[in-house]
Image (tube, helix red, strand yellow):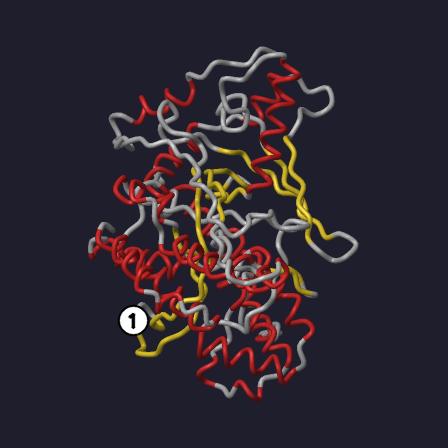
């Protein structure tokens, strides 16, 4: 007698397995083909993170690190769905370049930026207030302030640095905070002391003998994230030559680097009329909210016009490309953009909100939707804070957040803790510009690829 056909074996495949297969295919595509010209930002995950800093595209003329000076402003923007404007306006945070750092020669010569200019006018306004404490309170929207829930950010511009780096063998851009740069300087000084000589090369981005860096992200007893950074050292009984061989940047990784936009392309002479317009958009909203009245000052408006007149105009094609970039990577939102690796580990399949009434959603479904939304739209401290917050919300609040996320493409604003124990005392005067080297980016083609790789590998070797 023939065995009875077991139809139960042919149930639908689990979505988790399908997602795993698709993401694995996507990951391999990125590794083999290099993906888009613009690399995603690296996310520092909980626990131990090992990073290998890459050299500049043109090591003879460019540094492996570029300053990125920005201010975060809430802006009123057209809602975009499926690449098209819906006709609605929404409010979103945008990380905006500062002209005195990222502008062309004319803008740097003028020495003015909309955000820095606005800050200087508010500072002048504060000088008429008697009492140090009263002045500090008046300036809190600019400088930020400490609340019971953590640090509330102001609009004062800050400067971090960006480098290309490898994390888990994936290439991305790493935003290096100011205190991390100081730690790296201390590590360099310790290496110089050990070798009893002044280094004439960067000990982290050297392709043959560079030290990988280890960043640990852990919560302290108060539940606040702390970061520690140190260089990776040779294992016990491992020779220096073995250590270098294990951590040497490969030719394939260098070729992938060359396929991406250089840091010079991304962060030098890159301030356009679109950046100016976004800054003014956010500043007008900020001024209206805080009632400083700076936009009623004719002198301020004249200086804004002075900046606008010499802003280079971004070509239409570039503007369209920028829109696509912001839509796909989240550039401009507070924090770094998400890497493909991060999406693999955090993003879940979005429920279809249009087909159901969110006010009837159960708690599990609401959380699932919000976690997917947070993974797509938030990074670093905001990302962690929002995940923690939704675990505390009641079902009614979860449903309200889901509706807001769907309608406004943003969540209620949280007070987010700073990554340091205390923020650096920047004062209210815009910090001086960070010096940056200028150079022309060389074009790379197939015939010149070998010459470009030789630039990376012809470095002086450190003695064993």
From what the image shows, is residue 12 above or below residue 267?
below
Q: Quadrant of the C terminus?
A: top right
Q: Is residue 96 left or right of residue 424?
A: left
From what the image shows, is residue 361 above or below residue 386?
below
Residue behind mark 1 = 84
Q: Residue 291: x percent and y percent?
A: 46, 72
Query: Could you tell me which residue is drawn at 58 percent across and 26 percent down?
Result: 246
Q: Nearer the viewer, residue 105 or 400?
A: 105
Q: Residue 68: x percent and y percent?
A: 44, 44
- Is disc 1 placed on a helix, strand or loop? strand
Residue 256 in view here: yes
Label 1 CA crowd tier, 10 Å (few <14, some 14–19, many 20+): few
Residue reaching furthest right? 221
The answer to which image quadrant residue 92 occupies is bottom left
The answer to which image quadrant residue 55 occupies is top left
Query: Could you tell me which residue is drawn at 44 percent across and 66 percent down?
Result: 74
Q: Nearer the viewer, residue 323 or 249?
A: 323
Q: Residue 366: x percent and y percent?
A: 59, 78
Q: How many marks?
A: 1
Q: Residue 250: x percent and y percent?
A: 46, 28
From what the image shows, is residue 10 above or below residue 397?
above
Q: Is residue 233 left or right of residue 332?
A: right
Residue 330 in view here: no
Q: Quadrant of the N terminus?
A: bottom right
The answer to which image quadrant residue 129 occupies is bottom right
From what the image shows, is residue 321 above or below residue 265?
below
């Amino acid at each position: 007698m023939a065995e009875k056909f077991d139809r139960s074996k042919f149930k639908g495949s689990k979505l988790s397995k399908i997602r795993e297969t698709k993401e694995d295919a996507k990951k391999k595509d990125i590794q083999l083909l290099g993906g888009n010209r613009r690399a995603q930002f690296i996310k520092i995950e909980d626990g131990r993170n090992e990073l290998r800093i890459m050299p500049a595209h043109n090591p003879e003329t460019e540094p492996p690190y570029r300053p990125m000076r920005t201010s975060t402003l809430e802006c009123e923007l057209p809602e975009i769905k499926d690449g098209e404007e819906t006709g609605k306006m929404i409010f979103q945070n945008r990380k905006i370049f500062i002209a005195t750092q990222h502008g062309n020669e004319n803008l740097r010569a003028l020495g003015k930026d909309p955000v820095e200019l606005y800050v200087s006018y508010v500072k002048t306004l504060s000088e008429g207030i008697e009492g140090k404490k009263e002045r500090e309170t008046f300036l809190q929207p600019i400088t930020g302030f400490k609340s019971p829930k953590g640090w509330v950010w102001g609009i004062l511009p800050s400067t971090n640095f960006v480098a290309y780096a490898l994390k888990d063998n994936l290439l991305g851009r790493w935003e290096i905070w100011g205190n991390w740069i100081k730690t790296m300087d201390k590590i360099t000084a310790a290496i110089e002391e050990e070798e009893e000589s002044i280094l004439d090369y960067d000990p982290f981005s050297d392709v043959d003998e560079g030290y990988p860096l280890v960043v640990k992200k852990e919560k302290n007893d108060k539940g606040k994230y702390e970061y520690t950074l140190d260089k990776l050292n040779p294992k016990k009984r491992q020779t220096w030559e073995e250590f270098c061989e294990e951590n040497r940047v490969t030719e394939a990784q260098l070729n992938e680097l060359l396929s991406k936009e250089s840091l010079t392309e991304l962060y030098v002479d890159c301030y356009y009329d679109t950046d100016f317009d976004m800054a003014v958009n956010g500043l007008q909203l900020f001024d209206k909210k805080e009632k400083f009245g700076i936009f009623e000052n004719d002198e301020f408006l004249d200086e804004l016009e002075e900046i606008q007149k010499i802003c280079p105009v971004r070509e239409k094609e570039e503007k369209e490309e920028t829109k696509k970039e912001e839509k796909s990577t989240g550039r401009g939102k507070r924090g770094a953009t998400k890497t493909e690796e991060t999406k693999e580990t955090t993003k879940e399949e979005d429920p279809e909100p249009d087909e159901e009434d969110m006010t009837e959603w159960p708690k599990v479904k609401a959380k699932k939707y919000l976690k997917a939304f947070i993974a797509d739209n938030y990074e670093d401290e905001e990302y962690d804070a929002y995940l923690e917050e939704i675990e505390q919300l009641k079902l009614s609040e979860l449903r309200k957040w889901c509706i807001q996320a769907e309608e406004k493409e943003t969540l209620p604003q949280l007070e987010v803790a700073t990554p340091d124990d205390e923020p650096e005392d920047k004062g209210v005067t815009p910090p001086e510009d960070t010096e940056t080297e200028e150079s022309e980016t060389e074009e790379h083609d197939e015939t010149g690829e070998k010459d470009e790789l030789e630039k990376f590998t012809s470095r002086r070797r450190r003695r064993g």
